[in-house]
Image: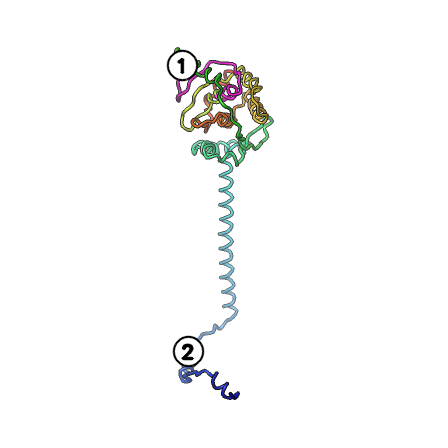
Amino acid sequence: MSKKNKVENNLIDIDIDIDKEIKDFYIDKEKIESIEIPDDLNTLIKNAIDNAEKDIKIEKSKKKFMYIAASLGIILSVGIYNPVLAHKLPPVKNFFQTINDTLQVDEIASFIGVDKYIPKAKLDENGSIKFEVVETTDYKVNKTDEDLNKELKDLDKEKNKDIKEEDNVQVNNLYMPNSEYQSIQFIHEMANSIIKAVDDRKYGIVEITPESVDIAITSLGYVKDNDVKEYLNRQLLNWKKGDFDNAVEVHNYVWNILGGEVGKAISIKHDEVNKIKSKYFK
């Protein structure tokens, strides 16, 4: 096949309407004359720049407002969660504390476990702020036959005398723990006296006194896990000084060790704490 035939075979028929294309391209004089060019091109440029600057200012104002709103939100959130951070400004601290109490922030944080990850601010004995994350442990203690017999005997004793009942509470006489389980349970019953349970179910109370605190510290000798022993000793030493701000943490710590299912602590009963302080820890 010749080169000419090859080229002809590869040609594509193109149907072009030349008149229509020219007509579509054509702009008549009237359309051209209708285009207005401002007499002062500088004014047009200045107006465009002014409008752009206004848009930029509006956008900056929006961003600044968002930053301020976000900052205020963070300050309020942190302050409400940790009112003690504003301890040097009593009116502000009281404001945050009121909101904290009204919204039950501490109770909610404890219930859902947020306090295990977000530290709480506290004042130490020198008035300095320290942050603490709630400590937890997987350590468990089991009730022995001796522990079970003791509890059954205590229940029999309570049936034969008048007892104070509050939220399904049984008030126990002071006793000397003589096992690991009883040591942990003793601290649990002490904590029960000053905490509010999420479901209002608490079983067993030992009054917090200097004597009962000393017994609790001494009975830690039965605890086999050193980390648990050291943690509880550290917390009970605060109780010995009349500082019970850690009551919820201590309760839930020993409550977990005992395999607690009901009666998780969510807040401190400040009225009870004040009574104990005025009576024993002046």
Give the answer, above or below, for where 94 lies relative to 35. above
Disc 2 marks which amino acid?
A: Lys
- Quick one: SS at disc 2? helix
**Residue underneath mark 2:** 31
Disc 1 marks which amino acid?
A: Ile
Q: Give the percent coordinates (x, y) of residue 151.
A: 45, 16
**Considering the image in quadrants, where does the C terminus appear?**
top right
Please identify the residue farthest to the front as the structure is shown. Answer: 1
Mark 2 to mark 1: distance in Å?
Answer: 103 Å
- Taking depth in this image into account, of 67 and 191 the one nearest to the observer is 191
Q: Give the percent coordinates (x, y) of residue 161.
A: 40, 11
Bounds of the magenta span? Answer: 162-188
Discs 2, 1 touching: Cβ within 8 Å? no
Q: Label 1: how many residues lie within 10 Å, few (<14), some (14-19) or many (20+)?
A: few
Give the answer, above or below, for where 21 lies relative to 108. below
Residue at left offset 51%, top offset 38%: 78
Residue at left offset 45%, top offset 82%: 12
Q: Give the percent coordinates (x, y) of residue 173.
A: 46, 13
Give the answer, above or below, for where 217 lies relative to 121. above
Toward which corner of the image does residue 229 lie, by quadrant? Answer: top right
Determine if the magenta segment contains residue 75: no
- Quick one: SS at disc 1? loop
Q: Does residue 153 appear left or right of residue 225 in this picture?
A: left
Res. 246 mark: none
Instruction: Answer with mark 2 or mark 1, whichever residue precedes in sequence.
Output: 2
**Residue underneath mark 1:** 163
